[in-house]
Image (cartoon, rainbow, N blue to C red):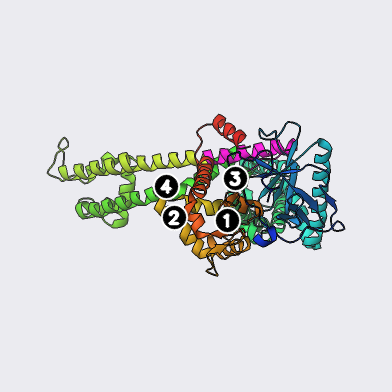
């Protein structure tokens, strides 16, 4: 382990690690591939790997047919490996403050849910030639490995091509134009029809022209829908609300085209074609943000509407009991009473309703206290209080949803900008963050000790009082809440505080963990601060841009 802690950026005051045989500590993933199995290696090159937040350590890396192998300099065992068929990108990083000016850093990203759990591996090389050589070699072999590993059928290849076609800007712009053109044609068709009979007469010249336009637009939108359905077969297609909306609109359009002359309800279905313009929302970010924000705010606002409806029902029952004999037309039944309550809440002719239920013994200029108290309390409680509360909740949640949409749009813009420059954004959250966060939610030192003890006992399956690297990784996979954690040798090294918590055999002991739990607590607190910094609401675009730059 001397090579692991021999980097130039090792913390000076950190504890000195013990010299431990890697094989005895069971920290390896097998032996380093032989020279004949290596397509490229870092022999003669000084390559460093980012371990933790700012600790650059020298590493040996090699490319085989299906793996990017990582080990310590001079070691015979693999400390970590990356399946090349799970590599999504390999690109240069922006200039890092903790990287020497003469070195170049690049990141290797993996797929989420894969062998490495979507982790990012960051390396640094000495010059531009090494950077180009390694990134090109990794991407080339990753493409070959992915093709061999996936062994896509012809149908799968067509699905990927269809998905690529749908993502092209030319395709998006073309169908946005068609949606607007179809909307204009529908308006012209409605304006040109002098009567309902002329609008359904297929022999009329204007109707024939508009029917032809409708047939062309429907065919084009049906083709687009089929391609989208094929590219996202089957369940992923229906997970999107926009796709479901497209399916309904296109299905109604096809039905109306197949039956141009029909009863009144078919004419009503034909007017549903105007809703195609709503599909434009998914292609325009501003409109999509508004629609998404409204839909996101509706579930919370629904609680306010339920409360408002319950209060209105109570007033409807009371109104029927009080005024059913005075004004049967307004409060004779529960339905009439509820409808009258709704009319009062709209502040529409509520004075006439008050006059209708006034007792005969009261004159024009007299006030009947019963209806006066009833209607005043109704308006104050429902119109002045509850409706205003519902509006305030709607505006508040709408504003939050807009901020989330804008933040996501800003992140997408930053990613596109970096991608255009050949760069990528780095997320340095530790893969053991779920484990550390669970330990960091402690109230005091005793509570932390109990949490560590319970976790240690759950992982120590053989009850031997020690945890080796392999026993720790196997135990985490068996625990549902930590099953997605993929530990590497560097992660284990960091968890054990440079192996200060390990015994001579490189295993964790419960007594040593309890005596030195402060290190785990500090790491957990650090991860919680990172999570809070990521999830807190931003209040301005400049602040969000600054946060993104800091995160990068």
Alpha-carbon distance for marks 2 and 3?
57 Å
Q: Which residues are magenta?
A: 403-427
- Ranked by sequence position, the earlier of labels 2 and 3 is 3
Considering the numbered disc 4 on the image, is that residue within a helix, a strand or a loop? helix
User: Can residue 193 be spotted in the picture?
Assistant: no
Residue to which mark 1 is pinned: 502
Alpha-carbon distance for marks 4 and 1?
54 Å
Considering the numbered disc 3 on the image, is that residue within a helix, a strand or a loop? helix
Residue to which mark 3 is pinned: 278
Considering the numbered disc 1 on the image, is that residue within a helix, a strand or a loop? loop
Magenta stretch, main secondary structure class:
helix
* Residue 376 included in the magenta stretch of the image: no
Q: Residues within 10 Å of mark 2 (few under 14, many from 20)?
A: some
- Ranked by sequence position, the earlier of labels 4 and 1 is 4
> In the image, residue 370 lies at what x, y percent?
17, 45
Q: Which residue corresponds to the image point at 56% horizontal and 50% vertical from the top-left?
A: 433
The one nearer the camera, 395 or 80, is 80
Q: Which residue corresponds to the image point at 27% horizontal and 53% vertical from the top-left?
A: 314
Q: Nearer the viewer, mark 4 or mark 2?
A: 2
> In the image, residue 2 lies at what x, y percent?
69, 48
Q: Quadrant of residue 383?
A: top left
């Amino acid at each position: 382990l001397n090579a692991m802690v021999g980097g130039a950026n090792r913390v000076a005051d950190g504890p000195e690690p013990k010299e431990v045989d890697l094989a005895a500590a069971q920290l390896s993933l097998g032996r380093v591939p032989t020279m004949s199995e290596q397509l490229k290696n870092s022999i003669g090159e000084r390559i460093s790997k980012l371990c933790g937040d700012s600790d650059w350590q020298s590493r040996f890396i090699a490319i085989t047919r299906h793996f990017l192998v990582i080990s310590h300099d001079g070691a015979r065992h693999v400390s970590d490996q990356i399946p090349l068929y799970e590599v999504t990108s390999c690109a240069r990083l922006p200039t890092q403050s903790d990287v020497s000016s003469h070195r170049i850093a690049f990141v290797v990203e993996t797929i989420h849910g894969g062998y490495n759990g979507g982790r990012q591996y960051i390396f640094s090389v000495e010059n531009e030639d090494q950077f180009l050589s390694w990134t090109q070699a990794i991407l080339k072999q990753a493409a070959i490995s992915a093709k061999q590993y996936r062994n896509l059928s012809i149908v799968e290849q067509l699905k990927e091509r269809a998905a690529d076609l749908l993502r092209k800007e030319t395709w998006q712009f073309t169908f946005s134009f068609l949606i607007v053109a179809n909307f204009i044609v529908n308006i012209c068709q409605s304006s040109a029809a002098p009567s309902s009979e002329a609008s359904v007469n297929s022999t009329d010249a204007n109707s024939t022209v508009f029917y032809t336009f409708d047939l062309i637009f429907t065919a084009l939108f049906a083709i687009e829908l089929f391609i989208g359905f094929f590219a996202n077969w089957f369940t992923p297609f229906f997970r999107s609300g926009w796709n479901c909306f497209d399916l309904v609109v296109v299905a109604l359009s096809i039905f109306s085209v197949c039956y141009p002359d029909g009863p009144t309800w078919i004419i009503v279905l034909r007017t549903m074609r105007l809703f195609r313009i709503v599909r434009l929302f998914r292609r325009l970010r501003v409109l999509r943000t508004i629609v998404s924000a409204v839909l996101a705010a509706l579930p919370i606002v629904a609680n306010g509407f339920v409360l408002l409806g319950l209060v209105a029902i109570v007033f409807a029952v009371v109104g029927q009991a009080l005024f059913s004999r005075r004004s049967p037309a307004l409060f004779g039944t529960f339905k009439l009473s509820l409808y009258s309550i709704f009319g009062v809440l709209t502040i529409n002719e509520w004075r006439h309703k008050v006059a209708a239920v006034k007792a005969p013994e009261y004159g024009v200029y007299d006030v009947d206290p019963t209806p006066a108290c009833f209607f005043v309390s109704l308006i104050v409680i429902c119109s002045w209080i509850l409706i205003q509360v519902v509006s305030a909740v709607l505006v508040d949640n709408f504003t939050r949803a807009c901020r989330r949409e804008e933040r996501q749009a800003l992140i997408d813009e930053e990613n596109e900008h970096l991608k255009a420059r050949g760069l990528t954004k780095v997320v340095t959250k530790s893969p053991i963050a779920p484990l550390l966060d669970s330990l960091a939610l402690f109230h005091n030192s005793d509570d932390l000790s109990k949490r560590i003890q319970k976790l240690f006992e759950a992982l120590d399956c053989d009850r031997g009082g020690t945890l080796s690297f392999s026993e720790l990784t196997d135990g985490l996979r068996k625990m549902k809440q930590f099953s997605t954690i993929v530990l590497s040798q560097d992660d284990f090294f960091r968890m054990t505080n440079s192996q200060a918590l390990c015994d001579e055999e490189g295993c964790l002991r419960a007594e040593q963990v309890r005596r030195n739990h402060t290190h785990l607590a500090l790491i957990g607190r650090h991860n919680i601060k990172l999570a809070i910094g990521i999830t807190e609401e931003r209040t301005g675009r400049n602040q969000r841009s600054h946060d993104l730059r800091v995160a990068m």
